[in-house]
Amino acid sequence: MKEWYEALFENYARKYDEESFVKGTLGECDFIEKELARDKALRILDVGCGTGRHAIELAKRGYDVTGIDLSEAQLVRAKQKAEEAGVEVEFLRLDARELPFENEFDAAIMLCEGAFPLMETDEMNYQILEGVARALRSPGRFIFTSLNGLFPLCHSVEEFHAVGTKDGKATYRSNTFDLMTFRDHSIITITDDDGKELELRANERYYVPSEITWLLKSLGFRNICIFGARLGEFSREHELTTEDFEMLVVASL
């Protein structure tokens, strides 16, 4: 039986590219470039690359990028978009919990909850971080976003999604946030690329900054910095608060 995130992305690529939360690619890549000192010699791994929006944009800017994702449909769309853009990106179908790389990349990105923290257990989410740590050379840079556990302590996740949802886009309802596990259980409704409506029971893990810091430190990361993640406006100037739905993490290895 497929997990909810596997079923979600089984036939949801073109529709995914129409969602509002994927519209910040250019500004987010500006931040990535700045963090990497615009060194075009660096090899970048994009974990949970989806339809390849960050990987393709970075390739346009001259970087060597490899994108991995579990969804065949997302990868097919990513390859089509790369061809249309006239750039070369290596797209591989891999499970982020079982990354096969070792000391191969200078930087890794993992944005818009492409893999972490969608997994069923904390152990599985940790496996993703472990795999990234193995894949990176030292010195290496890791840039990723995660759901901010401070947000649901002060706000309704369901109301947040309702405000950001437009007609024909993914909707979330019946959100139940568990204070013991920091997992939000919800029902997601989407219309797939064939026009079929799907209803899925989702389970997403929210993390607080101290958890992220400890997890990364245990894997040898240092200089761990956490900021508020604003769509298309990633910046070290944005201090993380309870108003931020996502956190932006930058760490060195």
Image: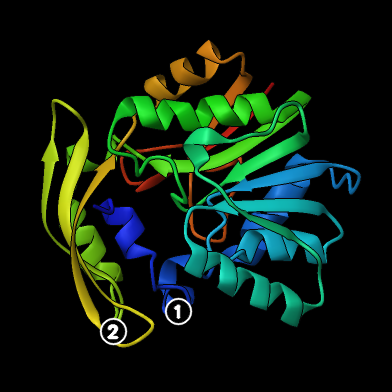
The residue lying at 73 percent from left, 37 percent from top is: 107
Q: Tell me: 200 left or right of 28.
A: left
The residue lying at 23 percent from left, 52 percent from top is: 1
Q: Residue furthest bottom?
A: 195
Q: Tell me: 47 left or right of 104.
A: left
Disc 1 + disc 2, Cβ < 8 Å: yes
The count of marks equals 2
The residue lying at 46 percent from left, 27 percent from top is: 127
Q: Which residue is mark 2?
A: 168
**Pick the front one: 124 or 161:** 124
Q: Which residue is mark 1?
A: 18
User: How far across and down, in percent of the image, does residue 179 sit?
Assistant: 13, 30
User: How far across and down, in percent of the image, does residue 65 sit?
Assistant: 76, 52
Vertical side of 65 occupied by 125: above or below: above
**Pick the front one: 212 or 234:** 212
Q: Earlier in the sequence, mark 1 or mark 2?
A: 1
Q: Tell me: 70 left or right of 120.
A: right
**Quadrant showing the C terminus:** top right
**Residue 82 quadrant:** bottom right
Vertical side of 11 occupied by 119: above or below: above
Dot 2 crowding, Cα within 10 Å, few <14, some 14–19, many 20+: few
| Secondary structure under the numbered disc 2 in the rendered image | loop
| Secondary structure under the numbered disc 1 in the rendered image | helix
Q: As shown in the figure, which amino acid type bears the numbered disc 2? A: Gly
